Image (cartoon, helix red, strand yellow):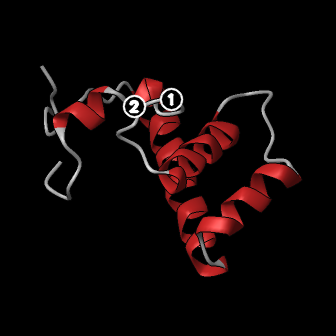
Amino acid sequence: MLAGATEDKVRAVEAYATSPLYSPAERVALEYAEAMTITGRRVDDALFKRLREHFSEPEIVELTAAIALENFRSKFNVALGVEAQGFCSIR
């Protein structure tokens, strides 16, 4: 949250698709993250086209790497039983 996201915005992430707190670029980035993360979903041509409306090719590559890294971490931590360290607790 130090990077600029408000607590309200973080709490509204589940409703990003309809929340006025998220910009169109943030919405498509989160949709992309879901498509990359949720088993059975795909990044189709229409989603990639919408990404290109908001992000350059290098930005898409960076976004993809960040999402992939977080997916890696979540699988790695669960497998080894790594618990949250309390760095980002939202009450």
Label whose residue precedes the other's in the sequence (1 or 2): 2
Q: Identify the residue position indicated by label 2 in the image.
A: 13
* Residue appearing at x 78%, y 32% in the figure: 41
Is residue 80 placed above or below 1 in the rendered structure? above
Task: From the top left corner, tell me how far across and down residue 56 is, in percent.
Answer: 62, 78
Determine which of the numbered discs, if any, sits on residue 18 in the image: 1
Is 57 placed left or right of 67 in the picture? right
Q: Secondary structure at mark 1?
A: loop
* Residue appearing at x 47%, y 47% in the figure: 70
Front-lying residue, 46 or 59: 46
* Residue appearing at x 44%, y 24% in the figure: 14
Kindly indicate the quadrant of the structure image that contains residue 13.
top left
Amino acid on which the number 1 mark rests in the picture:
Thr
Task: From the top left corner, tell me how far across and down residue 81 is, in percent.
Answer: 37, 24
Amino acid on which the number 2 mark rests in the picture:
Val
Kindly indicate the quadrant of the structure image that contains residue 12.
top left
Count how many numbered circles sit on residues in the image: 2
Hey, which residue is sitting farthest front in the picture?
20
Task: From the top left corner, tell me how far across and down residue 34 is, in percent.
Answer: 62, 36
Q: Do callouts 1 and 2 mark residues in contact (Cβ within 8 Å)?
A: no
Is residue 87 placed above or below 84 in the rendered structure? below
Is 4 placed left or right of 91 in the picture? right
Q: Secondary structure at mark 2?
A: helix
Look at the image and tell me in which quarter the C terminus lies: top left
Packing grade of label 2 (10 A; few <14, some 14-19, many >=20) is some
Is residue 63 placed above or below 47 in the rendered structure? below
